[in-house]
């Protein structure tokens, strides 16, 4: 495992997370598994750890531009924290191959959903 490759993965995931509003894990997890031979459990745990500074920095930048709805963010964060406890416990109980398949299904479902949503007119953009 080379430090340079880890830095490149971090740069790509950080850029995509901040620019596109996606969780860096969408990039980090597959990259760590495919490029660096991490197990699914290791990739997910590592991804969660490295997303902390990415999320903090991106949030500060977006907040400075008035693009954070704090009234929505706080309760979602509280629910997310509780969900994270449950999700981490569940992930640790699952076989690594099953966990990888479930992650792949999630990525495919999200991609299909996003692709289909681009084909419908967005009422929020109609008045602009």
Image: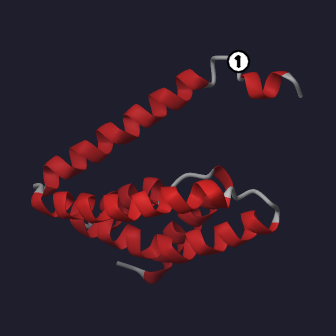
Give the residue at the far top of this rendering.
120
Identify residue for label 1. Answer: 121
Q: Residue 16: where, in percent of width, then height?
A: 60, 56
Where on the picture, by quarter, is residue 62? bottom right
Residue 7 visible to an observer of this rendering: yes
In the image, what residue occupies the spot 26% across and 67% down?
38
Q: How is the image coloured?
A: secondary structure
Q: Nearer the viewer, residue 37 or 97?
A: 97
- Side of 5 where 39 appears, left or right: left
Where on the picture, by quarter, is residue 83? bottom left
- Side of 118 where 75 appears, left or right: left
Mark 1 crowdedness (10 Å alpha carbons): few <14, some 14-19, many ≥20: few
Residue 39 visible to an observer of this rendering: no
Q: Nearer the viewer, residue 85 or 75?
A: 75
In the image, what residue occupies the spot 23% across and 50% down?
100
Q: Residue 8: where, in percent of width, then height?
A: 54, 70
Q: Residue 18: where, in percent of width, then height?
A: 64, 60
Q: Nearer the viewer, residue 120 or 28?
A: 120
- Side of 85 where 90 appears, left or right: left
Looking at the rendered image, the quarter that the N terminus falls into is bottom left
Dot 1 lies on which element?
A: loop
Q: Residue 52: where, in percent of width, then height?
A: 49, 74
In the image, what residue occupies the spot 65% across and 61% down?
70
State whether residue 32 is above or below residue 52. above
């Amino acid at each position: 495992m080379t430090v340079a490759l880890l830095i490149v993965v971090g740069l790509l995931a950080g850029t995509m997370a901040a620019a596109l509003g996606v969780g860096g894990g969408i990039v980090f997890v597959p990259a760590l598994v495919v490029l660096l031979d991490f197990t699914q459990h290791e990739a997910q745990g590592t991804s969660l750890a490295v997303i902390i500074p990415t999320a903090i920095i991106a949030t500060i930048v977006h907040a400075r531009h008035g693009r954070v709805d704090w009234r929505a963010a706080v309760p979602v964060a509280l629910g997310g924290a509780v969900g994270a406890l449950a999700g981490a416990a569940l992930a640790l109980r699952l076989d690594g191959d099953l966990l990888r398949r479930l992650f792949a299904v999630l990525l495919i479902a999200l991609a299909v959903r996003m692709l289909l949503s681009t084909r419908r007119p967005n009422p929020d953009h109609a008045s602009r």
